[in-house]
Image (spheres, helix red, strand yellow):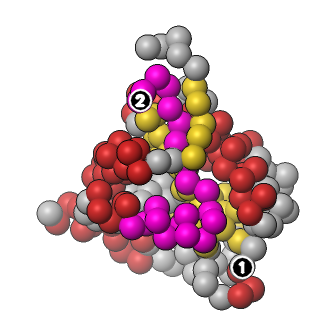
Amino acid sequence: MPDAALLIRPSREADLGAISRIYGHAVAHGTGTFEIEPPGQAEMVRRRADLLALGLPWLVAERGAAVLGYACAGVFRPRPAYRHCVEDSIYLDASARGHGVGRLLLAELLARCEAWGARQVLAVIGDSANAGSIGAARRYSEAPYPQRCRNSSMAATASSLFPLARARLVTPSRAKNRRPSASPVSAVSACRSAR
């Protein structure tokens, strides 16, 4: 149903089969999730319930009856200083990539995070070749990209923190004097190739 309108809405438990499939594909075929094995649907149910219990958004993009992708926000760190800082996650079905679905999910997610009380939203992008994710996050950036983040233990490339409903883009970089195996992305890749 290509002419059906795209709907961005809060997720429902009935969406978790599609959500699990989309995320499982990202785990199995990429490095951006930092997971090695795709979690089962029961684990995705738990993750969603944990975020919803905090009042955080978990959205889906739907066209017709098909879930094309999802977006959620989670607490960045448990320390009180980070209580207004969340990390976003957006995953799309392969058929939805490159059609603006991720950008629309991000826009709605940012608005809902701001309504929740977030002052900063971070986009941690674990695959520096993920042009779609970088482009969507960059769209909401006020600072020039990239800026070197020298004090990060991940030696990340990042734009500055966004006030209110803005996103922070964090991607791996090629830091000097760093062994490839020390990189989380390289570690995930090494584990995958050892399977």
Answer with mark 2 or mark 1, whichever residue precedes in sequence: 2
SS for callout 1? loop
Q: Nearer the viewer, residue 120 or 186?
A: 120
Residue depicted at 65% across the width and 45% down the height: 106
Task: Verify whether residue 50 appears in magenta.
Answer: yes
Whether residue 185 is visible? no
Q: From the viewer's perspective, is the residue at label 2 or at label 1 nearer?
A: 2
Name the amino acid type tagged 2: Ala
Q: Is residue 47 left or right of residue 100?
A: left
Left or right of 108 in this view: 160: right
Residue 47 % position (x, y): 43, 66
Residue flagged by tag 1: what amino acid is it?
Arg
Label 2 Cα crowd, 10 Å radius (few <14 / some 14-19 / many 20+): few
**What residue is shown with label 2?**
66
Q: In which quarter of the image is the N terminus?
A: top left
Magenta stretch: includes residue 67: no
Question: Which residue is depicted at the point 40% across and 44% down?
Answer: 15
Q: Which residue is drawn at 47% across and 40% down?
A: 69
Tag 2 secondary structure: strand
- Residue 63, percent from left and from top: 49, 25
Q: What stretch is highlighted in magenta?
A: 46-66
Q: Residue furthest top?
A: 3
How packed is label 1: few (under 14 Cα within 10 Å), some, or many (20 or more)? some
Per the rendering, the mark at residue 83 is 1
- The C terminus lies in which quarter of the figure? bottom left
Quarter occupied by residue 43: bottom left
In the image, farthest residue toward the left? 195
In the image, taking residue 97 as reference, residue 34 lies left or right, namely: left
Q: Is residue 172 visible?
A: yes
Cα separation between marks 2 and 1: 34 Å
- Where residue 90 sits: x, y (%)? 53, 49
